[in-house]
């Protein structure tokens, strides 16, 4: 049966590729799209074999990442586990605990639900890297409604067995990793997941890359699967954070002037007060900030919003803050095309977005996080939210376990 025809969720064991260095924390990194050039330099200063050398080789340097990966395998910096298995992974930090399973998820299955649109640039970048290295260097992040055998196994392993890896990163998060290689336990997980679905919480561009790579090969092979971290959201609810926008060249004064005809605009003396107003707003709301006082935009005109929305979209989709931003504010109010070049994104950090707006003579558009229930409802209807609408966390650390096609 072709993987695209499988109705259920498939998470297959694989032979993990892992670092053998003493200081594992020094060779791991955040996901590639959260690593700035300054971050990359800092990571490499801590250890010359940091995984960022593989995941961010730079445009036209994908071959260097391939050569580096092969060299690390040949010299023993990386080693391949003897037995295929699933990997229990735990993250434990201040105020949170998250556990799940790392495995090879079936690509093209109807059980994997994307919820966010992707941009062609990042997909092309990740595809070039994956083709060159013939490897999945970091997992995508999936969540599902569990409560079954797989969930119980995860907790049993994490509380009763000795880990393969045990490290604490500089952000204070404690990471542990275990291998599950017993065929009966692997089979029990497969049976439990067979009738379930999973939502892509993070890694839409990488999943789109998995699909593109699979389409390169008409026959079966390791490209039919992609590295994934699967978390039971009923046991470990994800933390959903906002992704803010920055529009270079559009001054706050101009953005506010145009917005006054689109909704209610309130001026604040401090960013802190504006963000407090944003947090308590009902319905779509946005803080506009940069040079000068910040402003809170609320109650966008329903008639104008309605005219801007695609008729075929559900009411739930039309009500999302990011839908109002993407379909109404950006194109209709500010005359901006939502592209990677014209609209920059900043994960989570409102103050960092405002600093970037000031450096670029632009406006930061600060958002509330979407509600998890809204995201799940939209995905279940087969719809996708606008690009960069969600940031689920905590995200898995990159570099704890890799997957190469040659070891399948």
Image (cartoon, rainbow, N blue to C red):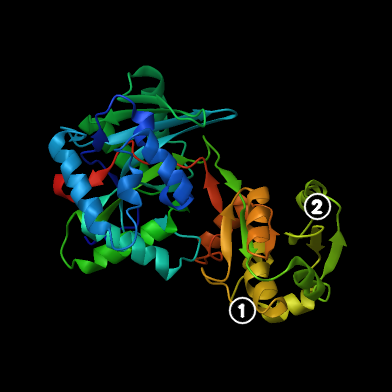
Which picture quadrant has residue 59? bottom left
Badge 1 density bin: few <14, some 14–19, many ≥20, Cα 10 Å: few
**Helix, strand or loop status at disc 1:** loop
Q: Quadrant of residue 78?
A: top left
Mark 2: which secondary structure?
helix
From this view, report whether residue 223 is shown above or below residue 253.
above
Residue at figure coordinates x 68%, y 56% from the top left: 367
Q: Foreground residue, 112 or 360?
A: 360
The residue depicted at 19 percent of the width and 34 percent of the height is 79
Query: What's the distance in space between the residues labelled 1 and 2, CA to CA?
Result: 30 Å
| Residue under the image location 50 percent in, 28 percent down | 92
In this picture, is 336 found above or below 356? Answer: below
Nearer to the camera, 160 or 75: 75
In the image, taking residue 261 as reference, residue 189 lies left or right, namely left
Q: Which residue is mark 2?
A: 274
Image quadrant containing the N terminus? bottom left
Of the numbered discs in the image, which one, if any, rests on residue 310?
1
- Relative to residue 223, is residue 178 depicted above or below? above
Residue 390 percent location from the top left of the image: 56, 55
Q: Position of residue 120 (x, y in %)?
A: 41, 70
Q: Is residue 20 visible?
A: yes
Point out the frontmost of discs 1 and 2: 2
Determine if residue 5 is in view.
no
Tell me residue 309's x, y (percent). 65, 77
**Residue 4 circle label:** none
Tags 1 and 2 in contact by the CB under 8 Å rule?
A: no
Q: Nearer the viewer, residue 235 or 8?
A: 235
Residue 150 x/y as whole percent: 38, 35
Count of all numbered marks drawn on residues in the image: 2
Q: Which badge, 1 or 2, is on the more N-terminal residue?
A: 2
| Mark 2 surroundings within 10 Å by alpha-carbon count, few (fewer than 14), some (14 through 19), many (20 or more) | many
């Amino acid at each position: 049966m072709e993987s695209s025809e499988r109705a259920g969720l498939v998470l297959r064991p694989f032979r993990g590729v892992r670092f053998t260095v003493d200081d594992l924390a020094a060779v791991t990194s955040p996901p590639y799209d959260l690593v700035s050039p300054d971050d990359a330099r800092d990571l490499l200063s801590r250890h010359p074999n940091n995984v960022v050398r593989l995941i961010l080789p730079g445009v036209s340097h994908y071959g260097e990442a391939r050569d580096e990966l092969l060299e690390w395998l040949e010299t023993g910096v990386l080693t391949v586990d003897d037995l295929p298995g699933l990997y229990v992974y735990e993250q434990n930090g201040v105020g949170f605990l998250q556990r799940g399973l790392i495995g090879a998820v079936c690509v093209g299955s109807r059980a994997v639900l994307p919820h966010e649109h992707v941009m062609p640039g990042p997909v092309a970048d990740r595809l070039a890297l994956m083709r060159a290295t013939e490897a999945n260097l970091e997992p995508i992040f999936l969540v599902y409604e569990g409560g079954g055998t797989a969930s119980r196994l995860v907790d049993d392993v994490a509380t009763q067995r000795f880990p393969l890896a045990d490290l604490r990163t500089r952000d204070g998060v404690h990471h542990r990793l275990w291998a599950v290689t017993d065929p009966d336990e692997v089979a029990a997980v497969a049976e439990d997941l067979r009738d379930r679905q999973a939502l892509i919480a993070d890694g839409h561009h990488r999943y789109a890359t998995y699909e593109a790579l699979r389409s390169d090969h008409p026959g079966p092979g390791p490209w039919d699967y992609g590295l994934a971290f699967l978390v039971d959201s009923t046991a470990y609810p994800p933390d959903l954070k906002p992704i803010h926008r920055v529009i270079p060249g559009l001054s706050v004064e101009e953005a506010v002037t145009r917005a006054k005809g689109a909704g209610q605009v309130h001026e604040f003396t401090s960013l802190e007060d504006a963000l407090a107003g944003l947090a308590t707003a009902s319905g779509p709301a946005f803080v506009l900030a940069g040079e000068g006082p910040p402003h809170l935009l609320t109650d966008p005109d329903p008639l104008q919003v309605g005219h801007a929305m695609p008729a075929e979209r559900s009411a739930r989709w039309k009500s999302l803050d990011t839908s109002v931003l993407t379909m109404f504010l950006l194109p209709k109010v500010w005359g901006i095309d939502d592209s990677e070049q014209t609209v920059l994104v900043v994960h989570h950090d409102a103050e960092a977005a405002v600093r970037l707006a000031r450096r670029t003579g632009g406006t930061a558009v600060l958002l509330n996080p979407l509600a998890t229930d809204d995201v799940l409802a939209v995905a279940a209807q087969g719809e996708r939210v606008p690009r960069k609408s969600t940031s689920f966390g905590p995200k898995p650390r990159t570099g704890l376990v890799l997957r190469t096609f040659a070891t399948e």
